[in-house]
């Protein structure tokens, strides 16, 4: 059992939990994720490690409530425990000195971006961060990421804060002004696709973190397969980070809708209870 | 007195009934039938059947006790060698192991050794297993990676030798393929759990959610333990590598079976994990895994369940019993056909498979006649779900993270007969060493490795 030792409500349906999991905390690196199961009847779901403290033996996860499991997770509180918490899984982020890097985070993708921003900064990169969300209330970790960045921008769909429009508009402006050596983008698939299409024109190395539906997270089921440069890769062991210019985003979008109908049913059931 | 030439029939659920549930298909022998079957045994002096048993059970010994009606003694004889008889008694391909060597085959069918083993294991489980005597502790610590049949057997045997054993398992349940792969109707999960409880009662500790190579490295295990056994199996699914394989509706056998068995998707939405299969399901491949997929599909409500295989029935690698069960249940075999592409609709959802007819040509390396496509024989079949069950390769995670471990060309860890790898303190066995094989071979490898580890530790100061 893995006890919840801290909880924060970041916005209406984005929650932060700190979980006691010493083995995971000891090994966690930016870009890696965990798989958890709330109880014996639960689904195994992957969540990125947003922060970890090896001394305390804790791992922080931040999640958006989208369906049955994440909603159930959002109800839990300090003192409750999770049945399973396995990790750290996946390959760590490619953190090294690139020069000038732009970190683009959208929606709940901002959470996994945070440890990467910190690590890139520590390596001596000039870090420019762009955070995007539908509206200002949905922006996560704003001050934390701001503090670790050399330049910092915000874009909201409704213009309630920062630039009104997409993160890619801001990225375009930065590319026009700066020599950019690498772009790291984590967020909705469509955002990563748009960012990758933009940077491809300028031949800027771009890394994205993919979030296909997973089951085991150990390379055993192939449910998480993604098409990279026409080759099949398993995101849980070969990723989740990939070269943004090589990803088949349309296939990923399609595969992530695989159980939409059934998930609705599970939620309805949960609501009925 | 002349010996009955055939095995006593195994009572089982009728096909039309059983395709509507996930309950076990064969009910098992009654006491009376078991005794009668045991009496068929000739008690051969040279025990040919034992040569076919990788875990070295004294077969005529336990059968003799059954014939006398002393089931407890029979259980003791089996348990002296095999810690998991309720499992091997159900899924072992006995026809090519012990029963394949049985003297009675000269005049008819062999003794139903597998059925008798299952009978005794079930008898013992229902009665409550005897807690074994704890041996004197040797003070040596061994780490076992993976809780499949190889790991569990190795762990159990080492514990009985007095060593302290800790198992590290990546998933949340023990058993490996026994839990996530083989369906409930062939191997009930409560039985796997009960066998694992027995291993734990021998003093073995099992840690879940530990992905060795990620959560903890093999090097760290080597520093903390006196020896390490790797039994991580062959979990990497093979693909057909044809266009359309990433469409919505194409699953690997592993994903499909894991969702249904380990995550209990057949009880969705009571359990949270979904699976969807539609009306027409096609399974590719013809091994045990493929039969399991095709039969599971029927139980999930598929109206048609096909098996597509590029060779003929004679080459099908599945056990005869599994093929027979599948056929009784209405699985349709399309032989000498090879898929060439999957076709989806505008939303990317699987709609059709296109395949070619084949004919048998010259024998290949394996001695089987190679299937060759018949030009212009393309056909299409409308389908909802495709299950790819054409084999698994050894799990790459540990080989990838251990530079000095010698790896074969199929990604398997290279060992000697006793499981010794190229690194002194590390032993390995089961599917990770042989490539995808069988439960009993994995158990045999675990057993030999336990003995080798014990010898290695005794040599060490
Ligand atoms: C490597 C990885 C890291 C991730 N990190 C985070 C994270 O840090 N924070 C976070 O909030 N989410 C993250 N996700 C996504 C998260 O796993 C899913 O949101 C979660 O599994 C949904 O489960 P559910 O039962 O609540 O929703 P469900 O009831 O399963 O689904 C509800 C809706 O969400 C969609 N959905 C289901 N699974 C996914 C998925 N994997 N990705 C996108 N949409 C999905 C469904 O299609 C459906 O529309 C990550 C996914 C991966 C693969
Ligand atoms: C669907 C199906 C049906 C089958 N039917 C039969 C049958 O009827 N009869 C028969 O004899 N054989 C059958 N087999 C084959 C048989 O199940 C395998 O040969 C056998 O299970 C191999 O045992 P193992 O212990 O080597 O590995 P596995 O059973 O694969 O167990 C390996 C374990 O190691 C764990 N693991 C992997 N990597 C790590 C890691 N890095 N850290 C920690 N843990 C890890 C896995 O999670 C798993 O629990 C079937 C196989 C399948 C898939
Ligand atoms: S070979 Fe057959 S008949 Fe002979 S001892 Fe073994 S089981 Fe009995
Ligand atoms: S989640 Fe199963 S292989 Fe990646």
Image: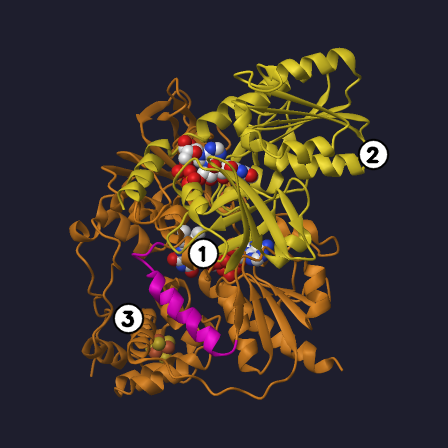
Chain colours: A yellow, B orange
Q: Quick one: quadrant of the C terminus of chain B?
A: bottom right
Closest to the camera, between mark 2 and mark 3, is: 2
Q: Position of residue B224 (x, y in %)?
A: 70, 69
Give above or below for A244 relative to A65.
above
The percent position of residue B102, horizontal first and vertical second, equals 37, 72
Q: Secondary structure at mark 1?
A: helix
Q: Main secondary structure of the magenta part?
A: helix
Q: Please name which of the two marks, 1 or 2, marks the residue nearer to the observer.
A: 2
Coordinates of residue A68 in the picture (x, y in percent): 38, 41
The tag on residue A124 is: 2
Q: Image point 59% across, 56% down: which residue?
A: A21
Residue B241 point in image, percent of width and height = 51, 32
In the rendered image, which residue does mark 1 sit on? B177
Name the one closer to the observer, A106 or A206. A106
Residue holding disc 3: B107
Pointer 2 and pointer 3 on the same chain: no
Mark 1 chain: B
**Residue at 43% across / 82% down in the picture?**
B46
The magenta-colored residue range is: B183-203
Residue A18 at least partly seen: yes
Whether residues under marks 1 and 2 lie with C-beta atoms below 8 angstroms apart, the answer is no
In which of the image's four quarters is ligand 3 placed? Answer: bottom left
On screen, residue B17 versus residue B39, left or right, reads: left
Side of B14 relative to A238 (left or right) = left
Q: CA distance from mark 1 to mark 3?
A: 36 Å
Is B205 covered by the magenta stretch?
no
């Amino acid at each position: 059992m893995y006890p919840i030792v801290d909880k924060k409500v970041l916005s209406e349906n984005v929650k932060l939990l700190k979980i006691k999991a010493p083995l995971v905390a000891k090994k966690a690196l930016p870009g890696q994720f965990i798989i958890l199961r709330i109880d014996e009847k639960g689904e195994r779901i992957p969540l990125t490690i947003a922060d970890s403290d090896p001394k305390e033996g804790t791992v922080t996860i931040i999640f958006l409530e989208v369906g049955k499991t994440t909603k159930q997770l959002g109800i839990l509180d300090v003192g409750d425990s999770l049945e399973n918490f396995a990790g750290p899984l996946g390959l760590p982020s490619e953190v090294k000195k690139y020069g000038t890097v732009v970190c683009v985070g959208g929606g709940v993708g901002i959470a996994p971006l945070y440890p990467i921003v910190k690590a890139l900064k520590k390596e001596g990169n000039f870090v420019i961060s762009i955070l995007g969300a539908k509206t200002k209330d949905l922006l996560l970790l704003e001050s934390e990421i701001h503090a670790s960045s050399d330049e910092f921008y915000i874009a909201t769909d409704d213009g309630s804060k920062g630039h009104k429009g997409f993160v890619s508009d801001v990225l375009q402006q930065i590319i026009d002004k700066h020599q950019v050596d690498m772009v790291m983008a984590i967020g909705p698939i469509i955002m990563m696709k748009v960012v990758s299409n933009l940077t491809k024109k300028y031949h800027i190395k771009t890394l994205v973190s993919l979030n296909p539906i997973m089951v085991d997270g150990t390379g055993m089921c192939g449910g998480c397969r993604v098409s990279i440069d026409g080759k099949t890769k398993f995101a849980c062991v070969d990723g989740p980070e990939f070269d943004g210019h090589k990803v088949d985003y349309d296939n990923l979008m399609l595969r992530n809708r695989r159980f939409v109908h059934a998930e609705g049913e599970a939620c309805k059931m949960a609501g009925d209870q | 007195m002349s010996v009955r030439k055939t095995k006593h029939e195994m009572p089982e659920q009728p096909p039309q009934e059983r395709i509507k549930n996930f309950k076990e298909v064969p009910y098992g022998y009654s006491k009376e039938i078991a005794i009668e079957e045991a009496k068929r045994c000739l008690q051969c002096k040279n025990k040919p059947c034992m040569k076919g048993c990788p875990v070295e059970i004294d077969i005529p010994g336990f059968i003799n006790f059954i014939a006398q009606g002393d089931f407890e003694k029979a259980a003791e004889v089996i348990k002296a060698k095999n810690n998991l008889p309720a499992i091997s008694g159900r899924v072992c391909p006995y026809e090519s192991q012990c029963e394949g060597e049985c003297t009675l085959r000269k005049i008819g069918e062999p003794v139903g050794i597998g059925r008798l083993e299952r009978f005794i294991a079930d008898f013992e489980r229902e009665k409550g297993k005897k807690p074994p005597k704890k041996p004197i502790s040797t003070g040596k610590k061994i780490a076992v990676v993976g809780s499949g049949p190889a790991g569990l057997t190795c762990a159990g045997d080492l514990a009985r030798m007095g060593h302290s054993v800790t198992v590290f398992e990546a998933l949340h349940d023990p058993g490996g393929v026994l839990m996530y792969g083989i369906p409930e109707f062939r191997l009930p999960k409560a039985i796997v759990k009960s066998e694992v409880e027995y291993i734990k009662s021998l003093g073995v500790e099992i840690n879940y959610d530990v992905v060795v190579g990620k959560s903890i490295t093999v090097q760290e295990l080597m520093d903390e333990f006196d020896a390490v056994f790797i039994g991580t199996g062959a979990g990497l699914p093979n693909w057909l590598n044809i266009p359309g394989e990433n469409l919505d509706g194409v699953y690997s056998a592993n994903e499909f079976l894991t969702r249904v068995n380990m995550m209990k998707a057949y009880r969705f939405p009571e359990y949270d994990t979904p699976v969807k299969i539609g009306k027409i399901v096609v399974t590719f491949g013809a091994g045990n895994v493929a039969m399991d997929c095709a039969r599971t599909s029927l139980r999930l409500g598929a109206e048609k369940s096909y098996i597509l295989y590029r060779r003929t029935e004679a080459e099908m690698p599945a056990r005869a019993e599994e093929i027979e069960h599948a056929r009784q249940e209405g699985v349709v075999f399309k032989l000498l056909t090879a898929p060439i592409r999957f076709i989806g609709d505008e939303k990317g959802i699987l709609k059709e498979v296109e395949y070619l007819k084949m004919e048998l040509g010259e024998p290949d390396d394996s001695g089987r006649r190679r299937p060759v496509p018949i030009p212009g024989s393309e056909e299409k079949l409308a389908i909802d779900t495709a299950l790819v069950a054409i084999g698994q390769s050894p799990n790459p995670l540990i080989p990838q993270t251990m530079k000095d471990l010698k790896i074969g060309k199929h990604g398997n860890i290279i060992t000697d007969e006793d499981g010794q790898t190229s690194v002194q303190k590390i032993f390995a066995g089961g599917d990770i060493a042989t490539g995808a094989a069988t439960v009993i071979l994995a158990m045999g490898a675990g057993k030999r490795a336990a003995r080798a580890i014990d010898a290695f530790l005794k040599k060490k100061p």
